[in-house]
Image (spheres, rainbow, N blue to C red):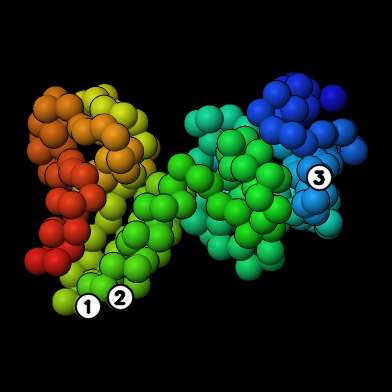
Amino acid sequence: MNWQVSYALANLPRQTRSTAEHVEGELIRIATPDKPDVLAAISAAHEIDQATAVSYRKQYPALDFLCGYRSTCVWHGKAIQYLEDAGVGWGNFGTLTSAALDGDANTASHKVYKFSDRLLRQYGRVQEVVREYDRIHRVSLKSGASVRIGMIADYEPTADAVRTLWEQFGPIDIVWNINPNGSPSPEAIDAGQELGCEVMKWDELREYLRTA
């Protein structure tokens, strides 16, 4: 049994009222009272692209949820779209545990980015949102402007976090600190300016989109 499957089986009962059992390979079954059983693949991949997502569905045709167990796992936009079109939930282990309790594993999406993704799509001046990665969105506005936005969920993003996001995903216009309780450090804001982007919270981003 792979290490991530062992960890998932050990940790899930501690966090939920669910029970879990190993089915085969990286597949587990989660049972929760009064909720549908969930077949979840527990992946140790550092990145999940479309080919990886397709491979998991071929291997486990009845799959309900694909879990990227590593906290650093990056999801490609095409993989996200593929899974959502196929009726397979996706996200981290926390997303899986919540989805099992809520009974919505087939439609669940990464809980770290779910609310922020929805905010962008529902904002009135946004015409189109293309999700390049779980945390990178290219937003087209009704004014004709296009903005590439990167999300950081840290409580207080540092300069290093801003630089790492830029280095990993390429140039961005906005670094959005999506943690509702924190704020970017002055050093993070300075690092963004050095790179040629702005670091901000939602209220500032909303105003930026309104006037762009």
Q: Is label 3 in contact with label 2 (beta carbons under 8 Å)?
A: no
Q: Amino acid at mark 1?
A: Lys
- 81 lies above or below 141: above
Residue 109 in the image, given as x and y percentages of width and height: 56, 52
User: Which residue is more in the foreground, 168 or 175?
Assistant: 175
Marks 2 and 1 close (CB-CB < 8 Å): yes
Quadrant containing the C terminus is: bottom left
Provide residue 138's location: percent of width, then percent of height. 32, 60
Q: What is the C-alpha distance between the residues marked 2 and 1?
A: 5 Å
Q: Which residue is mark 2?
A: 127
Earlier in the chain: of badge 2 and badge 1, it is 2
Mark positioned earlier in the residue sequence (3 or 1)? 3
The residue at which mark 3 appears reads as 33
Which amino acid type is marked by label 3?
Answer: Pro
Q: Tell us which disc is closer to us: 3 or 1.
A: 3
For the residue labelled by badge 2, is the local secondary structure a helix, a strand or a loop? strand
> Is 56 on the left-hand or right-hand side of 47?
right
Q: Is residue 68 visible?
A: no
Residue in view at x 82 percent, y 34 percent: 20
**Residue visible at 13% across and 59% down in the picture:** 207
Would you name the residue on which mark 1 appears?
Answer: 142
Q: Is 117 positioned to the left or the right of 29 in the image? A: left
Q: CA distance from mark 3 to mark 2?
A: 42 Å
